[in-house]
Amino acid sequence: MMIEHAESLRSGPDDRGHFGSFGGRFVPETLMPLVLQLESVYREARQCDQFQTEMALYLKNYVGRPSPLYFAERLTHHCKGAKIYFKRDELNHTGAHKVNNVLGQILIARRMGKKRIIAETGAGMHGVATATLCARFGLQCVIYMGSLDVERQQTNVLRMKILGADVRPVETGSRTLKDAMNEALRDWVTNVGDTFYCIGTVAGPHPYPAMVRDFQCVIGKETRLQMIEAEGRLPDSLVACIGGGSNAIGLFHPFLDEPTVEMYGVEAAGRGLKSGMNAASIARGRPGVLHGNRTHLLMDDDGQIENVHSISAGLDYPGVGPEHAWLDAIGRVKYISATDDEAVSALYLCAELEGIIPALEPAHALARVTTLAPRKQKEHLMVVNLCGRGDKDLLSIGGMKA
């Protein structure tokens, strides 16, 4: 996987892990040798034919890639505008895009000789993917999960436990994803020698944002080939939900140098952007440092991280990946938002029209598709990343249909 030329929007980060003024590597002294080693091992692995071949075989035979590109005919007819396609990463083994990244990181961990894997999870899909790959390769697995998320994602907690993971509820702070990541980082500092931290999104200290992105770029690479096969040309627009932003950057990144391709990242507006109960860190946040990188954060005037809210446990995070913060700053991607109610309505609409129940996370993207698509011409080709399936959210939305 070669780095693009300097004029490319795909060439970042720089050697210190910066995307413009965002990113970087802010870690305790204890962890610095480990992240430097990780950067070195990953650099070698991505240039290693054996690693790439092994990765490709597992993606095909274990994960089930390529995931289909599906023409959503009835939703297209309903919106009376753009031709809408779903990139169906919810059909991956474990039910979401998370497994793409976890597979890569677990293979890296094995190259580093690490036997103990830790991870944070919000909606539980990253935890399930991590537990799954640890079971496959016989590795010890510890998953940190906010106790609020444990309550609302009980199905995924059960799946992780069946797979042999030690699921540790976190009772501090807002008891959600931010707090789970805090505890995972504390564990990592304490157990540097034998532990590999498998981060679930394009956040954390360098090289994690770039490494996770590179593993998720399989989504956009497949989409590019599949759209040319289906329509004979590239899509006109791409839409994906944004929490930390791994599914979105995986779809967007292979198209960043295509000026004709519009891109929309959809944040969680929760109960409204002005309500104080949202997770829209680009729309409502400002630059700061959290979890090893500089990015847009939801914080108060004293720089303290605020409690955030989304009906979606996977988007319930006060920051965003640093590459997304940079793409917003240069205007390459347009970041918009959808409320809880809009996401739930979109979930039901997709289920009723297409027979597909999406997770609450991509339901945010679908909510904006229903407002964007009607404004486009019928020749416009729009791809939305269906990054997770909705089994995990059925108890959360029961009886909530508008």
Image (cartoon, helix red, strand yellow):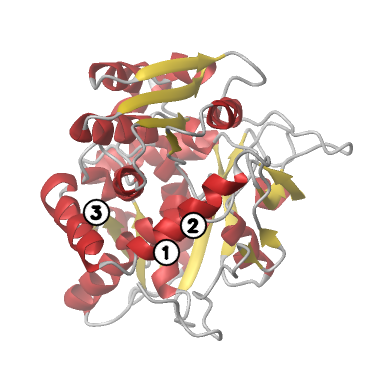
Q: Which residue is mark 3?
A: 74
Q: Secondary structure at mark 1?
A: helix
Q: Name the one closer to the observer, 11 or 52.
A: 52
Q: Find residue 258 and report its image quarter.
A: bottom left
Q: Are marks 1 and 3 in contact (CB under 8 Å)?
A: no
Circle 3 crowding by C-alpha within 10 Å: few under 14, some 14–19, many from 20: some
- Residue 396 visible in the current orientation: yes
Q: Secondary structure at mark 3?
A: helix
Nearer to us of marks 1 and 3 is 1
Residue at image x 43%, y 30%? 118
**Which residue is most to the left?**
61
Q: Name the one closer to the observer, 143 or 284.
A: 143
Q: Are marks 3 and 2 in contact (CB under 8 Å)?
A: no
**Cα–Cα span, label 3 and label 2:** 46 Å
Q: Secondary structure at mark 2?
A: helix
Q: Is residue 184 shown left or right of residue 298?
A: left
Q: Which residue is mark 2?
A: 39
Q: Name the one closer to the observer, 396 or 10.
A: 10
**Cα–Cα span, label 2 and label 1:** 6 Å
**Cα–Cα span, label 1 and label 3:** 44 Å
- Residue 80 visible in the current orientation: no
Q: Which of the image's four quarters has the C terminus?
A: top left
**Residue 84: percent from the left, percent from the top?**
31, 62
Q: Reading the chain from its start, which is encountered first: label 3 or label 2?
A: 2
> Is residue 120 shown above or below 48?
above
> Is residue 392 shown above or below 46?
above
Q: Which residue is mark 1?
A: 43
> Is residue 380 shown above or below 252?
below
Q: Which of the image's four quarters has the N terminus?
A: bottom left
Q: Are marks 2 and 1 in contact (CB under 8 Å)?
A: yes
